[in-house]
Image: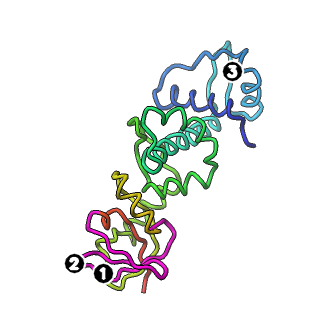
Amino acid sequence: MKLSERSEEILETLWISTVEEKKEPLFLGLAEREEAIAELLKGEYIDVSAGEVRLRERGKEEGERIVRRHRLAERLLVDVLDVKRGLTHEIGCKFEHLLHEGIDENVCTLLGHPKMCPHGKPIPPGRCCEKSAREVVQVVRPLKDMEAMDRGTIAYLATNDQGRLHKVMAMGALPGLRISMIQKFPSYVFQIGQSQFAIDKEMAEGIYVRLEKD
């Protein structure tokens, strides 16, 4: 069941306050939130007693996913769209509702599985982060560590430098695309499709590739 935006905002507030910050249960103004509270009660996300609102297990899980989408949205706004930090929370609140399950994992992979939002708050890990952590140990390595003629699929991009990220993306080096290493000296030359690109070591360090096994 797709929750309303008002219901998602309540779950987000509750999760941050009672799970992340470990504060006491909240007393929400129930009258002005009556419709959203009814929706959350019906879906068994919360319990309400004497004005106190507590998250049930299902509510904790959904609240964590909502917070994850919000903070990923903020990272996307800052790292890729170059939105000023002062505007990220307000825009992120609206943008998070567009990052449905699956899309948020694509965004997370694109950003290199960031651990913190622009405000220094932790981003709850998703399934894509756990999968990446397992695979990185086995077959994923930076482009700079590949040998000539190595081939693979771009796993994710990892850089805090917006300029480098924009340049790499402009070359078409996006997660999920096949990439081949052509040479490593005097510059790193790789091929995507029929196009070849030369980059420096710093840019090559930020492109992580899942190698093909021979």
Does the segment drawn in magenta span residue 5? no
For disc 2, the neighbor class at 10 Å (few under 14, some 14 to 19, many from 20) is few
Q: Dividing the image into 4 quarters, which one contains the C terminus? A: bottom left
Q: Give the mark nearest the N terminus, 3 or 2.
A: 3
Q: Residue at x 40, y 42 (%)?
A: 116
Q: Give the mark nearest the N terminus, 2 or 1.
A: 1
* Horizontal side, residue 18 vs residue 136: left or right: right
Q: Position of residue 28 (x, y in %)?
A: 63, 17
For disc 1, the neighbor class at 10 Å (few under 14, some 14 to 19, many from 20) is few
* Horizontal side, residue 165 vs residue 26: left or right: left
Q: Position of residue 92 (x, y in %)?
A: 54, 38
Q: Residue at x 47, y 68 (%)?
A: 172
| Residue most extreme to the left | 186
Q: Amino acid at mark 2?
A: Pro
Q: Residue at x 41, y 61 (%)?
A: 157
Question: In the figure, residue 86 lies in which quadrant?
Answer: top left
The one of 120 and 84 positioned closer to us in this rendering: 84
The secondary structure type at the circle numbered 3 is strand
| Location of mark 2 (residue) | 186
| Location of mark 1 (residue) | 147
Q: Amino acid at mark 1?
A: Glu
* Horizontal side, residue 140 vs residue 17: left or right: left
Q: Magenta part of the protein: which range? A: 173-202
Whether pointer 3 and pointer 2 mark residues with C-beta atoms closer than 8 Å, the reply is no
Residue 165, compared with residue 56, is above or below; it is below
| Location of mark 3 (residue) | 48
Q: Amino acid at mark 3?
A: Val
Q: Give the mark nearest the N terminus, 3 or 1.
A: 3
Cα gap from disc 3 to disc 2, whole angstroms: 66 Å
Question: In the figure, residue 150 lies in which quadrant?
Answer: bottom left
